[in-house]
Amino acid sequence: MLTSVTTYFRERKDSIQRNAYVVGGAYLAWKHIAGRIKELRDVQLIQKFAEDSIHRRFIRNESDINFTIMKLLPTLNEQILDGMDVEAITSELQEMVKLKKAAEEAAPTEQEASPEPSTSSTSPTDARSESGSVSVISSGQGDVTATSELGASWVDNMSTGQASQPHEPSTSTSAHEYQRNSSPESSNIGTDLSESFISNSSVSYGDIAPAPQTFTRSKAELWKEVKMLTLTRTLTTLYSMTLLSMLVHIQLNILGRRKYTLHVIKMAHDEKRRDAAKDASSLLNLVCGLKEDDVYKEEDIRHLSPVQEEQERKFLTLSWWLLHVGWKDVGERVRRAVEEAFEDVGLKQKLSASELHRLMRDVRRRVEFEITFEGTERQTNFSSTLLPPTDEMLRHALIQGGIHVRSALMPDSTFDALLAETRMHIASGSFARVLATCLDKATDVLLTGVESNVFGNPDAQGAAWEDPNAALGQEPRVRLANMLPPLARWSRVALEANPNELIDGLGSLREVHAFNAVIYTNYEDCFQP
């Protein structure tokens, strides 16, 4: 029996070997394919988990950015409104007129029986169109009663002050008629009339003290300052909020990427250790005497130094520079641009919406571009506005922002790396393009809000709707004086509103999301060998 079995296998040895090879190969192939399928499935699951994780972290980071900006806005609000106090100038104008009227009422009025003719050529419609200009701007400081004559006094006084200046602004027909017919005597009459208008609109300020008060500036200078400062403050608010938003976006995306990368590295460390422990406990490694430390080495994974809490606080404190110093640099640039663009635009000059857009574009061009020595234009670099340009200024900003002196003076390679990357992003062409897009959006928000109050409110701005141009199908035109109160009010609303239309609008831009994604996924230079 045994012999026959042996003979049987000997005769069929070749075929049995071939079959064994085939079956064994098929089994090994199946095991390999099954392993690869499982590996691919695991890779897909890990990749999907990683994508979901980075997406959740990115969305949470966007929410943190918006929250941080809103927490910083009150500081910017205080700095700008205190540094560019339009309401204080209007209050000074009202006080000046009230004091003069009180002095006139105390003196004998001998000319009551012979009233002098009025030389003002402003129509009733124009008077209505100019109503409430000063009172609306000064409403943030006192309980001022608004009347229709108050805006007229603004325009008349400004025109009187500009009549003695070398540059005559281009005004409406009634303004030219007023200038042709004005004499020194009639100018005084017009001034007295405008003073009575302002005085009547300011009765809620209380009684005037009998002691005389000295004013350092004339009324003409104050009217001009109200115009320039209102426009300057509005555009400074626009630029400062946009730059603050961009700075916080860069800072928090850098920090968010660092934290996410550290999280991934920690997961990789844990996975490597688990694999090393499994390999070290295998039969082969037990026989060979290998330990876990021999299988797993720290240098197998590149190292990224973590950001400590104090370093993160120092990095975020850099916004102190923009909130307390940088915005003033922006304000100076805006002030020069406004003076150049609006110098010849009088308060009585009527503007259409398209002309207002053109003037705003002119101001923006002067702010965002500068002339080189070769006579060509180049884009303005806001690096020194956003961040301290020197080490001494950097230490000053950190100390003033609440960082301990020792920490501010101590060398810190991690903080230096964060600062260097921030400067790199600010100096990049991508930042310049995204900033221009953000400023376009901010300007649209500003002009849309102003136009809805000036051109879209017939009750408040009746002159715009009774303008002959509107009846002829042309653009309505409104005096610049009527645009100043909405402009002054917009800067307050933009800085104080919560939720904030401007900040939300900037954060929703596609270009901003793309810029954030570029920073958040920039892993090339964040590792140290």
Image: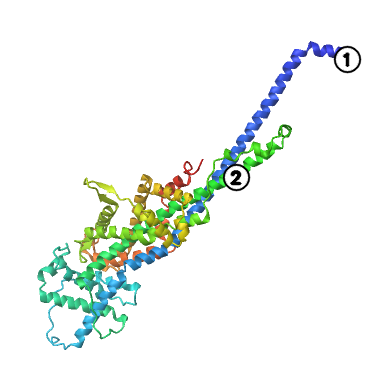
- Callouts 2 and 1 close, C-beta under 8 Å: no
Relative depth, front residue between 318 and 469? 318
State the separation of the CA atoms marked 2 and 1. Answer: 61 Å
Query: Which disc is residue 143 wearing?
Result: none
Q: Earlier in the sequence, mark 2 or mark 1?
A: 1
Check disc 2 and give the amino acid type.
Met
Q: Is residue 35 left or right of residue 360?
A: right
**Viewed as shown, does residue 67 lie left or right of 209?**
right
Q: Residue furthest right?
A: 1
Q: Which residue is mark 2?
A: 267
Above or below, 8 relative to 44: above
- Specify the color scheme: rainbow
The residue at which mark 1 appears reads as 2
Q: For this view, does 38 lie left or right of residue 431?
A: right
Helix, strand or loop under label 2: helix
- Place of residue 355 in the rendered image (x, y in percent of width and height, measured from the top left): 24, 57
